[in-house]
Image (cartoon, rainbow, N blue to C red):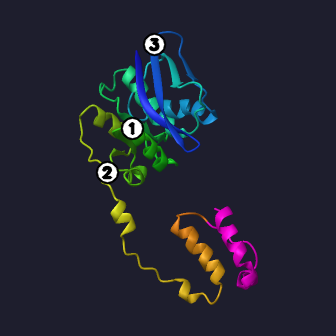
Amino acid sequence: MLSIIKSISLNGIEGYLVDVQVDVSEGLPSWEVVGLPDITVRESKERIKIAIKNSQIKLLSKKVTINLAPASLRKEGSFFDLPIAIGILMSTQYIWEQNLQDTIFIGELSLDGKINKVNGVLPMCIEAKKLGVKRVVISKDNAREAAMVNGIKVIPVENLIQTIKYLNGQIEIEAQGNNIEEIFNQNQVYSLDFSEVKGQESAKRALEVAASGGHNCLLVGSPRMWKNNACKKNTNNIAKTKF
């Protein structure tokens, strides 16, 4: 039986939907992943099989073929674990939900069935919204980040069993609320600030610029160098290039 589950991947800063096509059929037991998968995706075989087994689901030995379309673009990352597992469970009729055309799945599986946090969720969800996605099923640890994108229903899940029950309508999961105002309007009080740093105006300015953009910053050189006014011009260069 053939099932098609949607996920998303990034090519640089541009996102594209990936159709995770899973076919489970009779034949010699095998597992094949095609569609330009990298080594991380190929390794997902063992993670997914054991995660399904430890979720109290017994899969019969079948021929499993997984195609990640479009096949012309390379697929990287462990976040394909969840959509592949959902596709297998749909093909074996453990999941009977069929209305998933506007839903994407993102998540890495642990061997015990837990859905782990992955990197790059925010740009994925931004691109998913542009591509018309209405709902994303994602790790609970990534839900707050994903919910920063308006117009997408974010369903936080903790493990594979919970995801199956949700898709089968056995349980309800409240969508993650949009938390942009909560994040940017929170009045945090810190015990330390720049008022306790004597001098170093150039270094403090570089750190402020980096912090305002949410970037990393690496200061190179001795403190004496940063006190030199002649180095102020270099401060901007460091702030721009060391993120």
3 to the left or right of 201: left
Q: Give amino acid for label 1.
A: Leu
Which tag, 3 or 2, sits closer to the chain's start?
3
Q: Which residue is mark 1?
A: 160
Q: Are marks 2 and 1 in contact (CB under 8 Å)?
A: no
From the image, state whether disc 3 or disc 2 is nearer to you: 2
Above or below residue 173? Residue 208 is: below
Residue 37 is tagged as: none
How many badges with numbers are in the image?
3
Residue stretch rendered in magenta on the structure: 217-243
Tell me the residue at 72%/82% (across/down).
223
Is 136 magenta? The answer is no
- As helix, strand or loop, the secondary structure at mark 2 comes to loop
Quadrant (top left, top right, bottom left, bottom right) of the C terminus: bottom right
Above or below residue 128? Residue 68 is: above
Instruction: From the viewer's side, name the closer residue of 114 and 233.
Output: 233
Residue 202 image position (x, y, % from top left)? 65, 80
Tell me the residue at 50%/19% (across/down).
64
Which tag, 3 or 1, sits closer to the chain's start?
3
Q: Give amino acid for label 3.
A: Ser
Above or below residue 66? Residue 211 is: below
Residue 25 is tagged as: 3
Quadrant (top left, top right, bottom left, bottom right) of the N terminus: top left
Tell me the residue at 33%/34% (across/down).
164
Label 3: how many residues lie within 10 Å, few (<14), some (14-19) or many (20+)? Answer: some
27 to the left or right of 102: right
Residue 176 is tagged as: 2
Q: Can residue 115 be seen here? A: no
The main secondary structure of the magenta stretch is helix
